């Protein structure tokens, strides 16, 4: 069976709007491999947003994170003694 461009667009639409489970079922109904949508989406650069937005609590924890003070690392002293790197 030859897959037309319209069928490809329909598969990508189902994948983008309804998700991977619906796209796999749609491909199976068309007589294609259940994983056809995945390869097609990869080739066409279509991706479904997979992550959820951060909650306010997660954002606050990220903002309150204290960076590590590495100014006493012996490698800094070595780098200062060595001087600037010339290319």
Image: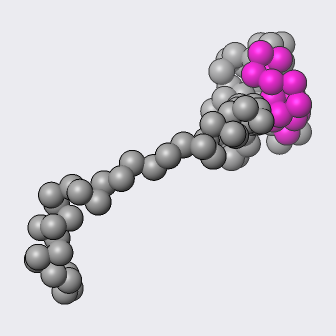
Is residue 12 found inside the magenta-colored segment of the image? yes
Q: Residue furthest bottom?
A: 86
In the image shown, does 59 or 17 lie closer to the viewer?
Answer: 59
| Drawn side of residue 62 relative to residue 47, left or right | left
31 lies above or below 51: above
| Drawn side of residue 42 relative to residue 77, left or right | right
Please give the name of the residue rendered at 68% of the width and 33% of the height, measured from the top-left corner: 58
Please give the name of the residue rendered at 60% of the width and 43% of the height, measured from the top-left corner: 64
Instruction: State whether residue 3 appears in this view.
Output: no
Q: Locate residue 7, reporting x and y percent.
A: 85, 33
Q: In this picture, which residue range is highlighted in magenta? A: 9-23
Q: Locate residue 41, reporting x and y percent.
A: 70, 37
Q: Which quadrant of the structure image shows residue 62? A: top right
86 lies above or below 4: below
Q: Which quarter of the image is occupied by the C terminus?
A: bottom left
Instruction: State whether residue 77 appears in this view.
Output: yes
Q: Locate residue 84, reporting x and y percent.
A: 20, 83
Please give the name of the residue rendered at 15% of the width and 67% of the height, measured from the top-left corner: 77
Q: Which quarter of the image is occupied by the N terminus?
A: top right
């Amino acid at each position: 069976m030859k897959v037309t461009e319209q069928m490809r667009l329909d598969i990508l639409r189902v994948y983008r709007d309804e998700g991977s489970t619906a796209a796999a079922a749609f491909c199976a109904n068309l007589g294609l491999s259940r994983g056809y949508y995945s390869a097609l989406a990869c080739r066409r650069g279509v991706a479904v947003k997979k992550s959820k937005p951060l909650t306010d609590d997660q954002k606050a924890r990220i903002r309150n994170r204290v960076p590590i003070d590495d100014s006493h690392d012996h490698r800094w002293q070595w780098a200062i003694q060595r001087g600037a790197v010339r290319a």
